[in-house]
Amino acid sequence: MASVTNDQNTPVRVLTAEGAFEPSPAAEKYLSQLDRLTDDDHRRFYRDMAVTRAFDFESANLQRQGQLALWVPSHGQEAAQVGSAHASRAQDTIFPSYREHAVAMIRGVDPLGILALLRGVTNGGWDPTDPKNGNFRIYTLVLGTQALHASGFGMGINFRGEAGTGDPETDKAVMVYFGDGSTSEGDVNEAMIFAASYQTPQVFFLQNNHWAISVPVTRQSRTPLHERAAGFGLDTVHVDGNDVLASYAVSALHLDNARGGQGPQFIEAETYRVGAHTTSDDPTKYRTDEELNSWVGRDPITRFGSWLRTQGASDAFFSEIDEEAKDFASDLRRRCLTLPDPDPQSMFDFVYSEDHPLTDEQAEWFETYEASLEGGDAQ
């Protein structure tokens, strides 16, 4: 391993943009976390990033072809997600925003559920209580609310005495993902207040991709976002979010701290949204090619692949992953196109836990309306 570099202004970083192992000074306290990883883990990290990107591209194509109502790209943010997700344990509960495709897959969610949600044939996509889905909650389209859900869940873990027991194999934590735009939401700030007040076993994982749709992060905050979180009393860290090893190491330590009863933690992973905010957005209207190209040059997959080559990864390995990623994306396209339409009446089933006269009336009207269409009476 190379020696620690001397640039005191860099965040926690293990790999340079070129893929050289040159940890920043801030990384020194986290390097021991990397001892947990094997060569197989390193290859799994690369595989997960490559497969996620192929899935991302295929899904964007499906949307452009009219097969999805919307797509939320994750291009550029794969390292932040893959590193942090692999640092979590099976007993941890994950609250996502709506861009955490890699985290979902790592936790066990079939990504077809993501496509089903954005195709409009389900209101959820998957059952978060099903063990096969790895305690991964459903996507949150009302951004910021997931932080409150996570803090409340973390309070419940504390009330049940399921954290800070001294047993790392059973102690639990919560991790919540959100973007820089959500830090301007009242929900996220209130969630940090409750987390600090009740010392929840929780990690706030901010993916700072620099743009809240068209609003730059520099307009949202005059101070670094992790410093704002420190004002709430959270233990905070700033990490290079395009460095999968740094993301893993930082997340592993802070999740351990949360499970161990040291209260809420806050990770700002600085990354970049290479694509649009969603497929309804045109980023060329508000950002420059120069800025975009500077971040494309720090691509997380290319960076980690360069390091893997120095560790002996062969051309055959990368070719196999490329083929796997293509097959994975192609299979999801096929399965997406065969998703059945839901029964329209099902929209009334779960509005209230019990029958309600208003929804009963609406369901009856809708049934009559559908019957009129079948009979050819409607114009």
Image (cartoon, rainbow, N blue to C red):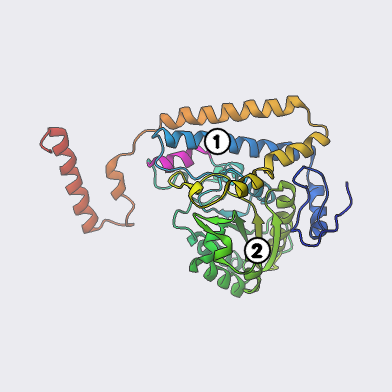
Left or right of 79: which side holds 307? right
In the rendering, at what x and y percent does residue 370 appear? 19, 40
Q: What element carries label 1?
A: helix
Secondary structure under tag 2 reads: strand
Q: What residue type is labelled 1?
A: Phe
Marks 2/1: CA–CA distance:
29 Å
Kind of residue at disc 2: Phe
Q: Do the residues labelled 2 and 1 touch (CB within 8 Å)?
A: no
Question: To which residue does mark 1 refer?
Answer: 55
Q: Quadrant of the C terminus?
A: top left
- Which range is magenta? 110-120
Image quadrant of residue 119? top left
Mark 1 surroundings within 10 Å by alpha-carbon count, few (fewer than 14), some (14 through 19), many (20 or more):
many
User: 275 above or below 158?
Assistant: above
The residue shown at (56%, 57%) is: 179
Where 4 falls versus 192 (above or below)?
above
Q: Which residue is the site of mark 2?
A: 266
